[in-house]
Image (cartoon, grey):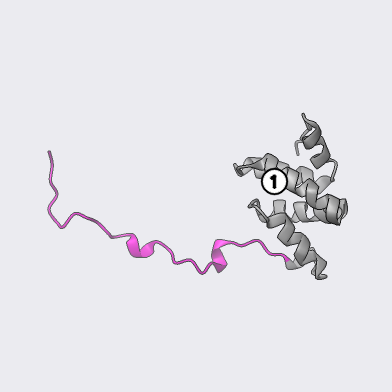
Amino acid sequence: MPRPRGRSQAERDFLALGEGAHAWLIEASAAGTSRIRAKMAAACELAALVGDEEVDAALGIAAAAGRFADGDVAAIVDHQATGAAAADLVPADETHSAQLGTATWANFSTITGKETTR
């Protein structure tokens, strides 16, 4: 696995949080996450409040679960504070989605039986 290296002090501070921060940065970059620097700064601010270990663990879980939205790391830290184990956090997948599929639209067309050519 590649090891990111911080080019700025802010990046070095984020990566100093631990292995979870490294994993999060790699996965977030691969997923094309927007505003990565702002999210890294928010994680460092959160670590100053609750501790590096807690935030690093949350970053590792967020990376594994593909959670890169604003507030995801803070939500995971809050969830962990209730005593929940990391094994209790399950990434969402399509098998258990409440979202309707697109099969209904498979035969939908705006053409009413007559093909026109120009």
* 8 falls in the magenta region: no
Quarter-wise, where is residue 30 in the image? Answer: top right
* The residue positioned farthest toward the top in the image shown: 7
Instruction: Give the position of the N terminus as an image quadrant.
Output: top right
Residue receiving disc 1: 39
Residue under the image location 74 percent in, 56 percent down: 61
Query: What type of secondary structure mainly makes up the magenta span?
Result: loop
Q: Position of residue 101 (x, y in %)?
A: 43, 64
Q: Position of residue 79 (x, y in %)?
A: 76, 66
Q: Nearer the viewer, residue 31 or 78?
A: 78
Residue under the image location 82 percent in, 35 percent down: 12
At numbered mark 1, what does the secondary structure look like: helix, strand or loop? helix
Quarter-wise, where is residue 13 in the image? Answer: top right
Q: Specify the segment rendered in magenta.
A: 89-118
* 95 falls in the magenta region: yes
Q: Position of residue 37 (x, y in %)?
A: 69, 39
Q: Nearer the viewer, residue 71 or 101?
A: 71
Work out whether 9 lies above or below 75. above
Crowding at dot 1, Cα within 10 Å, few <14 / some 14-19 / many 20+, comes out as many
Residue under the image location 16 percent in, 57 percent down: 112
Instruction: Give the position of the C terminus as an image quadrant.
Output: top left
Q: Amino acid at mark 1?
A: Lys
For the question of whether residue 50 can be seen, the reply is yes
Q: Is residue 117 left or right of residue 42?
A: left
For the question of whether residue 3 can be seen, the reply is no
